[in-house]
Image (spheres, rainbow, N blue to C red):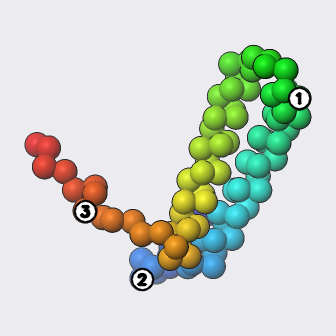
């Protein structure tokens, strides 16, 4: 899918990228909704199983990152490239 998003001139196709991110948000929202319903929306202080906890955390992280990238693509947030430059040698 990433090859389809990046065009021949190394520019991303923003519409395709937004569509891809929205699909991932919907996909992983279903995972978190299913787990919320399974554990009664955490009203009983039930402990999650290890596998469910990993799935929930992974899905929640994907959703968070997708929303972050969408806000960057919509120019509501800015990504400072200098924050990734390190003096560590």
Quarter location, residue 44: top right
- Quadrant of the snapshot with the N terminus: bottom right
**Residue 34 screen position, x and y as percent:** 85, 38
Q: Residue at x 69, y 70 (%)?
A: 19
Image vertical order of residue 33 relative to residue 64, above or below: above
Q: Which residue is mark 3?
A: 82
Question: Which residue is at the front of the view, 45 or 13?
Answer: 45
Query: As rendered, which of 39 and 2 lies closer to the eye?
Result: 39
Which residue is rendered at x = 73% and y = 48% of the image? 28
> According to the image, label 1 marks what residue?
40
Indicate which disc, 3 or 2, sits on the residue closer to the N terminus.
2
Mark 1 crowd level (few <14, some 14–19, many ≥20, 10 Å Cα): few
Q: Residue at x 73, y 26 (%)?
A: 52
| Residue at mark 2 | 9
Q: Nearer the viewer, mark 2 or mark 1?
A: 1
| Mark 2 → mark 1, Cα distance in angstroms | 49 Å
Distance CA(mark 3)–CA(mark 2): 24 Å
Front disc: 3 or 2: 3
Name the side, left or right, on which 82 lies relative to 2. Answer: left
Q: Nearer the viewer, residue 40 or 31?
A: 40
Mark with earlier residue (2, 1): 2
- N-terminal label among 3 and 1: 1
- Residue 32 visible somewhere in the drawing: yes
Mark 3 or mark 1, whichever is nearer to me: 1
Asked whether the beta carbons under mark 3 and mark 2 sit within 8 Å of each other, the answer is no
Q: Secondary structure at mark 1?
A: helix
Residue 12: x and y in percent read 50, 76
Q: Is residue 63 above or below residue 67?
A: above
Give the Cα separation between the discs numbered 3 and 1.
44 Å
**Could you classify mark 2 by the number of other residues whose Cα lies within 10 Å: few (under 14), some (14-19), or many (20 or more)?**
few
Residue 22 x, y percent position in the rendering = 70, 64
Marks 2 and 1 close (CB-CB < 8 Å):
no
């Amino acid at each position: 899918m990433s090859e389809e998003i990046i065009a021949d001139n190394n520019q991303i196709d923003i519409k395709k990228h937004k569509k891809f991110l929205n699909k991932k948000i919907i996909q992983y929202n279903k995972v978190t909704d299913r787990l919320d319903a399974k554990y009664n929306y955490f009203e009983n202080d039930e402990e999650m199983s290890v596998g469910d906890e990993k799935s929930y955390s992974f899905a929640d992280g994907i959703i968070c990152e997708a929303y972050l990238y969408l806000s960057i693509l919509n120019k509501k947030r800015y990504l400072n490239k200098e924050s990734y430059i390190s003096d560590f040698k």
